Amino acid sequence: MVDDSFDHLATRREEPVWQPMPEAVRTFFERPLPREPEGAETAYQDFLEQVVPYSMGNDHPRFWGWYMGAGNPVGNLADLLASVLNPNLGGGDHSPVLVEQQVVAWCAEAAGYPTTASGLLVTGASEANLVGLAVARTARLGPEVRSDGLPSGRRFAVYASTEVHSCHRKSLELLGFGSSALRAVPVRADWTMDVEALSAAVAADRAAGVEPLAVIASAGTINTGSLDDLEAIADLADREGLWFHVDGAIGGFLALSEHAAAVRGIERADSLALDLHKWMQAPFDAGLALVRDEAAHRATFSVVPHYLAHSTRGLSGGEVWFNEYGIALSRGFRALRVWMALKAYGASAFGQLIDRNVVQAQGLAARVDAHPEVERLAPVGCDIVCLRYAPAAVPAERLDEVNHELVLRVHESGVAIVSETVLDGHLAIRVAISNHRTREEDLDLFLTTLTRLGEQVVADLVSAS
Ligand SMILES: Cc1ncc(COP(=O)(O)O)c(C=O)c1O
């Protein structure tokens, strides 16, 4: 299995990134519970035949959809080792807990955040952001919020730009504030939060009797990768007494790269959400929640019943019990995949990969700008290029339809995976190059495929109608 897995990675470039599943594959997965043993050989053969060819494709050099990492071989092997050892990192005095503590401190350092912060690995940035905002809630409203819920008769507001990721809405819904507490602050032409508009929104809320609670800055927005001005937002948060949370899912590790200055101010965050399965290339899933004030962190999540009591000796010793920092009690050994990769490759290598992806994104943008039939729809933020196929022959009102169909045809071609979004009311094709396997030639192939398929889409949809 290990040999096949590494052969798979070595030959991945020659295969389609993704391919549609035949009906027979879908029906294969409708088979009933196997009550009698089929044997490990059959299970593995079925995996090879029914799963591998139709997987997502984010292990491929030309996967640039949504925002994902490609995984890495040391991380892959670490997953096997972690799974064999199979410890539970909810708590207890055992070395895997120290591995995770070290990963938390190393990642804080890599992100330019205080290494004294408390933190824990979670499923991804959605959960890391929820942890940060949950701590903000207890820190600002007091421990009573845990027993009594939100105080009745008071209204609260949390601020973020219109570009903030949708997971924050879920967080505010789950924390009882309701999504209407999320104030969508307008962005400037570069897609970063308009800090003057933020200031005005806070003042308007105060005047209306609403209590401003926290501000979420995006260190890399999901649509365009734009980086909010963290220093300016931190200054405003200080002045206004707001909890300062940074969503660093995309750009949170820029401090490792040549672009460290772009995230100056990240160290001032009260809480920081990071994603390791994005630009840090950890196999899924791995996010990291960091909180500057350990006591506030623990005061938000700690519940220690008799059956989970800590002691000073035995396996129930140990200073940090991660279940006191987050939602899960039982937790896998996610930390090993990050720890081994950081040791094997060195943190600087990840910084260099980030730099290379940024150069690749800027190079693609330059080729788009020079192309008569493709146009760019936003400045390149981090490693994200937003573009559309827009030949003069296609009327403006048909461009969304053409580009939507084009994204699907690119998928079906197997050449690349890109995704789509809407910018200023226009459908944009998003190319998010957070992939350490990508080469320049991959981006050239994408662009020629895009225009070749674009001509077909126009012939089928526009010329035919
Ligand atoms: C800015 C930002 N925040 C949060 C998330 C959610 O992260 P995850 O998918 O790891 O839960 C993403 C995902 O792309 C993101 O780009």
Image (spheres, rainbow, N blue to C red):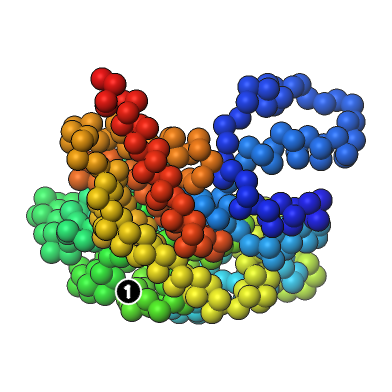
Give the answer, above or below, for where 373 lies relative to 229: above
Counting labels gives: 1
| Helix, strand or loop for disc 1 | helix
Identify which amino acid the numbered label 1 is placed on: Ala
Residue nearer the viewer, 317 or 458: 458
Residue nearer the viewer, 115 or 296: 115
Q: Position of residue 85 (x, y in %)?
A: 80, 60
Residue nearer the viewer, 48 or 236: 48
Q: Residue at x 67, y 27 (%)?
A: 25
Q: Residue at x 51, y 45 (%)?
A: 415
Q: Residue at x 80, y 70 (%)?
A: 314
Q: Position of residue 312 (x, y in %)?
A: 73, 74
Q: Position of residue 121 (x, y in %)?
A: 57, 62
Which quadrant of the view contains residue 461?
Answer: top left
Could you tell whether 429 is left or right of 34 in the image?
left
Task: Name the residue carrying label 1.
Answer: 262
Q: Position of residue 378 (x, y in %)?
A: 25, 55
Could you tell whether 339 is left or right of 292 in the image?
right
Q: Residue at x 28, y 53 (%)?
A: 371
Q: Is there any visible trace of residue 86 in the rendered image?
A: no
Which image quarter is the C terminus in?
top left
Residue nearer the viewer, 259 or 54: 54
